[in-house]
Amino acid sequence: MANIKQIKNEYQEIVKSHSPKNKVMQNSLRAFWVGGIICTVGQGLSNLYMYYGLSKDDASMVATVSLVLLSAIFTAFNIYDNIGKYGGAGALIPITGFANSMVSAAMEYKKEGYIYGMGAKLFTIAGPVIVFGTIASVIIGIIYYFV
């Protein structure tokens, strides 16, 4: 019995010595910084569109579409992946991360054709987000209606 405990302890020491060090503070700061920049770009676009005469609601909508378009373009040129590697969760801000996941899946399966490749695999990652987002919005809408 003592031999098994000794082996487990030795194994734990080996695992500990070869495991990468956890950089929670550094990763958190990077996520905050990158996410903040993406949000700032979105707000800047919204302000720019309002400056050129759009209402606040229209400017917000066009800014959202612009962020999706920029995310898709950056994904196509492999820029967004580098931003994601550096910024981690900060690059997964819902609207840009959603566009990135859809374009990445489409690019990966393009060689299989437009229908069975891109068309079928486009929603592999994004599909569950759409389904659960729709379900959550219906539930929240019902609660909002009755409260």
Image: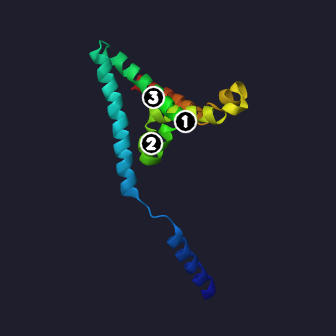
Whole-number angstrom distance, CA of label 3 to CA of label 1: 13 Å
Residue located beneath label 3 in the image: 70
Q: Decide: few, some or many residues near mark 3? Use Cα within 10 Å; few <14, some 14-19, many ≥20.
A: some
Residue in the foreground of this view, choosing between 44 and 134: 44
The amino acid type, in three-letter code, at marker 1 is Ser
Helix or strand or loop: what does disc 1 sit on? helix
Residue in the foreground of this view, choosing between 144 and 102: 102
Residue in the foreground of this view, choosing between 110 and 144: 110
Q: Residue at x 54, y 32 (%)?
A: 76
Sequence-first tag of 1 and 2: 2
Residue located beneath label 1 in the image: 101
Sequence-first tag of 3 and 2: 3
Foreground mark, 3 or 1, reads 3
- Disc on res. 83: 2
The amino acid type, in three-letter code, at marker 2 is Ile
Q: Position of residue 126 (x, y in %)?
A: 57, 33
Q: Residue at x 41, y 59 (%)?
A: 23
Q: Is residue 53 visible?
A: yes
